[in-house]
């Protein structure tokens, strides 16, 4: 059942322009950060990697997953799926797997765009996987709370701000650095 749902979700997400934009935003900003020039100074590749992956880890699981769950609720396909014997766990597992797959693909692109050495790829993959799993739970929770796709942003933005802002500015302030550790 999960395999069939997974295939359906891959096809559905490929047709949704909003979802595709969410996937492209971290890559776009990664390329943009690599092109920024501050009077002959460029951002260090590790910093660009950190910012871009942080955006990916906060944006994709929360907005992407919440949006595709809300889309199913909005189209009433969730009701049809549950009437056909699909359990809630199978439904969420399928959505989480699709989100994880896309997120790791985006993170892989970011890794290579920033020019990181290939010998760090395994460690990078392990770190992003562990963080992805935690953020997928947040996205699933936000998706279950939202009534439709429009309401997901009202629920997701506070989550994204809490998880994105402190780590992004942790180097600028000791208080934000302490908060970011949590």
Image (cartoon, rainbow, N blue to C red):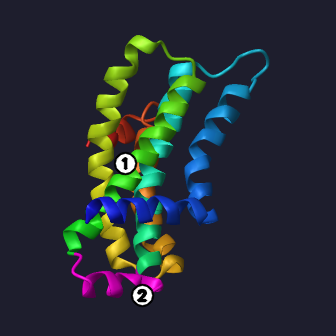
At horizontal 40% and vertical 46% (from top left) the residue drawn is 101
Q: Residues within 10 Å of mark 1 (few under 14, many from 20)?
A: many
Q: Is residue 168 visible?
A: no
Residue 20, percent across and down? 59, 56
Left or right: residue 37 versus residue 133 is right
Secondary element under disc 2, as helix, strand or loop, is loop
Q: Quadrant of the N terminus?
A: bottom left
Up-down: is 46 above or below 2? Answer: above
Q: Earlier in the sequence, mark 2 or mark 1?
A: 2
Rendering quarter of residue 44: top right
At horizontal 51% and vertical 40% (from top left) the residue drawn is 106
Q: Is residue 76 magenta?
A: yes
The one nearer the camera, 108 or 59, is: 108
Up-down: is 169 above or below 152? Answer: above
At horizontal 43% and vertical 50% (from top left) the residue drawn is 58
Secondary element under disc 1, as helix, strand or loop, is helix
* Residue assigned mark 2: 76
Residue 128, percent across and down? 35, 36
Instruction: Compute the Cα span from label 2 to label 1.
Output: 24 Å
Q: Give the residues drawn in magenta, as a range.
A: 73-86
Up-down: is 122 above or below 169? Answer: above
Main structural element of the magenta stretch: helix, strand or loop? Answer: helix
Residue 137, percent across and down? 27, 58
Residue 139, percent across and down? 36, 62
* Residue assigned mark 1: 100
């Amino acid at each position: 059942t999960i395999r069939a749902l997974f295939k359906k979700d891959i096809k559905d997400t490929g047709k949704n322009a909003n979802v595709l934009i969410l996937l492209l935003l971290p890559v776009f900003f990664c390329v943009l950060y690599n092109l920024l020039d501050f009077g002959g100074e460029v951002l260090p590749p590790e910093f660009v990697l950190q910012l871009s992956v942080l955006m990916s880890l906060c944006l994709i699981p929360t907005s992407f997953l919440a949006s595709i769950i809300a889309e199913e609720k909005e189209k009433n396909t969730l009701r049809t799926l549950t009437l056909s014997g699909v359990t809630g766990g199978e439904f969420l597992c399928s959505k989480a797997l699709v989100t994880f797959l896309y997120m790791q693909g985006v993170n892989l692109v970011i890794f290579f765009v920033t020019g990181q050495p290939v010998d760090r790829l395994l460690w990078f993959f392990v770190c992003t996987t562990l963080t992805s799993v935690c953020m997928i739970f947040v996205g699933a929770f936000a998706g279950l709370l939202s009534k439709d796709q429009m309401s997901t942003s009202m629920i997701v933005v506070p989550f994204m701000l809490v998880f994105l802002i402190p780590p992004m500015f942790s180097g600028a302030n000791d208080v934000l650095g302490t908060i970011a550790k949590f």
